Amino acid sequence: MKQYLLAVQFDESVPETEEETRAQMARTGRVTEEIRAAGAWVFTGGLQPSHATTVVRPANGTTTMTDGPFAETKEQLGGFWVIRCEDLDQALAWADKCALACGRPIEVRPFHDGAED
């Protein structure tokens, strides 16, 4: 079994009503429960908006800290699932359900397991 990150890409420039947010949370909650029931769930989390971000950058043996996201882009990481699957096809099937539930793009990325690819 491999672990996969299902990363929700969130466009902060598109406002969402409270009603839309509640409906989206209900749909993603149902998918999360389905993932749990299937034994594929490892961890999930929603993130605060990118303005709450602090970036710590190393340079010349020291670090600097700046407010705001790492990259200036309209799409930010909005939340994620970490799941355990037999293969990429199974992870993509879960990502399909997650994308439909939250109405946002999902980036699927396998965790590095130390094996040679």
Image: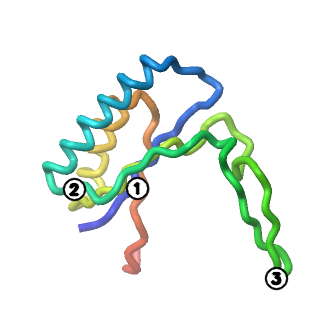
**In the drawing, does residue 32 fall left or right of residue 7?**
left
The x and y percentages for residue 98 are 33, 38
Q: Nearer the viewer, mark 1 or mark 3?
A: 3
Q: Looking at the rendering, which quadrant does residue 30 occupy?
A: top left
Residue marked by disc 3? 61
Relative height, residue 116 to residue 67 (above, below): below
For label 3, the SS is loop
Q: Residue at x 71, y 52 (%)?
A: 70
Relative height, residue 33 to residue 2 (above, below): above
Question: If you read the primary sequence from the N terminus, does the residue marked by circle 1 or circle 2 appear first?
Answer: 1
Q: Is residue 107 visible?
A: no
- The amino acid beneath tag 3 is Gly
Q: Is residue 20 visible?
A: yes
Q: Residue at x 16, y 56 (%)?
A: 39
**In the drawing, does residue 67 fall left or right of residue 75?**
right
Residue marked by disc 2? 40
Relative height, residue 15 to residue 61 (above, below): above
**In the drawing, does residue 89 fall left or right of residue 45?**
left
Per the model, the C-alpha gap separating discs 1 and 3 is: 31 Å
